[in-house]
Image (spheres, rainbow, N blue to C red):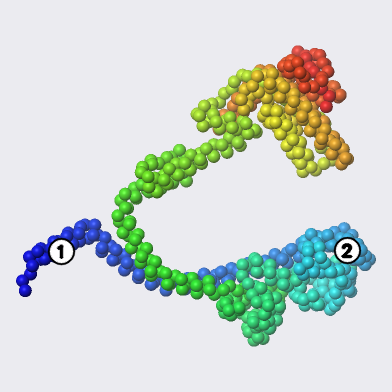
Amino acid sequence: MPLNPETTEAAQGKWARLRYRLAQLRIKITVPYVLLALLVTFAAAFIVTRLLAGLLEDRFHAALTDAGRKAADSLAALEEEHLAIWRNLAFTQGLDKAVATGDRAKLEEIAVPVAVNAQQDVLEILDRDGAPLFAMYHIPGGSVADYDYTPAAGQAIWPTVQTVLQKQTDPLGDKYAAFVKTERGWIFYTLGPLQYEGRPVGALLVGTYLEHLVARLDAAALARVSVYLDAGPPQATTLAPQAPELLALDADTFQAYMERQAYQSPRRDIQVGGRSYAEVFGGLKVRLVQNAGLFSVALPLSFVTDSGSATRESMMSLFGAFIIVVVIVGILIASAVVHRVQRLAAATRQVADGNLNVQVDVKGIDEIAALSRDFNQMVNQLREGRLYRDLLGMTASPEVATRLRDELKQGRLELGAQTIEATILFADIRGFTTLSEGHEPAYIIDMLNEYFQGIVAIIREHNGVVNKFIGDAVLAFFGVLPENTPPEQSARDAVAAALGMLDYVTTINRRRLTQGELPIRLGIGVNTGPVVAGILGSEVRFEYAILGDTVNVAQRLSDLNKMYPDYDLFIHDTTWLRLGPTLPVEAVHLGDVEVKGRVQPVNTYAVKG
């Protein structure tokens, strides 16, 4: 049957188009590359999954070993805590005499606060024969202060107690530690002798319930912990607390683990509650006793099995699909993207090296363009944050820091100053040395912090700016920042702030007098006049400063209550005349007063505190 010419021509046209597409250089490069990538990916996935199981097992065993080490360290730390409590009590004045005389009331007075504050489970004090003089046992499940003070019996026959009472020592001294089974269950004790006037009078025992001990080791190791003091079920466990018999060790296994733990960490796999666990054993070491028993740490085996299964199942499929997409997309857009990413990466490296002036060009509206914009914004914020942080570290007031930041952002920050008429307030605590005498430095700091907190708030409330603290003195200015104000306004603000400060100190003194403390007395000077205000220092370190004779006179005025003890606030007449007809306070005109450091007297008004 002859072929239809039209059909033949159509078939030849499709084949020609297919050949043309396959002949494209992009296809010639991409197809072999993708096939090779898939082959390498599946081979790598197969090899990796084989290796991963061994790596996970090693990692799991390392995690078990690390958990065991943390548990051992936590036990040693607990013993040190016991010793710290023991020393705290043993060296408390009066305890040794109370033990020697059998004064139980005194023992309770001394021991109870220490044990409760330390949240200690057990505290026992024995006489020289091992008989209990005082005991307190925390009630499980109770509050911090719930203790049973009924002494137990039988301590005298404990080997460790006999060792202590007989004044035996080991290379570490005369303190010992031991696990003891009591009527209240197993307890981990640290104990040592008590002496009075050079002779032994008894023993002091500090203990922790074994259940609390394993809970603590569990929290430290982030693994389930069990303690085996003998063959059989563990004496305490967080792995199977409701059914410890599931974890029992027969006598032969217990003995074998005890012998092996000196040079390796025995391991067993066990089923608990439908889950598989790996349990690693180590020796309990307390003081010099190397073989006090065994402890174990356990982690679920699902850490290995789940990770390995998930990896094996997903490796082939995810790697294959993901690599194909990555290869194809990478080939298509790499040339358009790599250059832009490289520029962004180079800019990032400059930022990491500390260059916060770098910027990247933003082209387009895609994700890389958005990332470039975010990068530029981030660098701007970092730059502004660093500058603002540095400025805050150079200034003593938020208003000053804000002024410096604004000027710096506008490129106007220059070292220099301007002359402006402002009002200065200088306040000093009178007799601060006497006030501080007999007090600890911490008390003085707390007192000054309380004082400064209120004073600064009052000054800022009246539009003032604290320029600096000079010991117990405060220098503030009005009418300069955050903006210049007329001298009449700055004078009224400063006097109002001074009156508020005196009222605040009066409030503080009421409390201090009720507490039997000396009252605080201020000397405040207020002066209005020309000052030099601006940035003082160098380009590396500078501060905002207020200088001039006006500042000096305000400081000298604050000292006048040494000459005029009935007054606390002294106002220069240049300030007084600017207060206006409605005066905020009644004052006494002292006239011209001579002040230290000035030839000309100062016309002054005085106000009582």
Secondary structure at numbered mark 2: helix
> Is residue 202 at all visible to an observer of this figure?
no
Picture quadrant where residue 262 is located? bottom right
Residue at horizontal 43%, vertical 72%?
A: 312
Name the residue carrying label 2.
108
Q: Amino acid at mark 1?
A: Trp
Label 1 neighbour load within 10 Å: few <14, some 14-19, many 20+ = few
Marked residue nearer the N-terminal end (2 or 1): 1
Residue at horizontal 20%, vertical 57%?
A: 24
Q: Amino acid at mark 2?
A: Glu
Name the residue carrying label 1.
15
Viewer-proximal residue, 63 or 165? Answer: 63
482, above or below 102, in the image: above
Query: In the displayed structure, does residue 69 sit left or right of residue 321?
Result: right
Picture quadrant where residue 299 is located? bottom right
Marking on residue 519: none
Secondary structure at numbered mark 1: helix
258, above or below 314, in the image: below
**Pointers 2 and 1 in contact (C-beta within 8 Å):** no
Query: In the displayed structure, does residue 76 sit left or right of residue 131?
Result: left
Which quarter of the image is occupied by the C terminus?
Answer: top right
Looking at the rendered image, the disc whose residue lies closer to the viewer, 2 or 1, is 1
> Is residue 495 at all visible to an observer of this figure?
yes
Query: In the displayed structure, does residue 5 sit left or right of residue 175?
Result: left
Viewer-proximal residue, 555 or 528? Answer: 528
Picture quadrant where residue 453 is located? top right
Viewer-proximal residue, 89 or 460? Answer: 460
Q: Position of residue 324 (x, y in %)?
A: 33, 63
Q: CA distance from mark 2 to mark 1?
A: 103 Å
Q: Position of residue 389 (x, y in %)?
A: 57, 38
Residue at horizontal 30%, vertical 51%?
A: 335
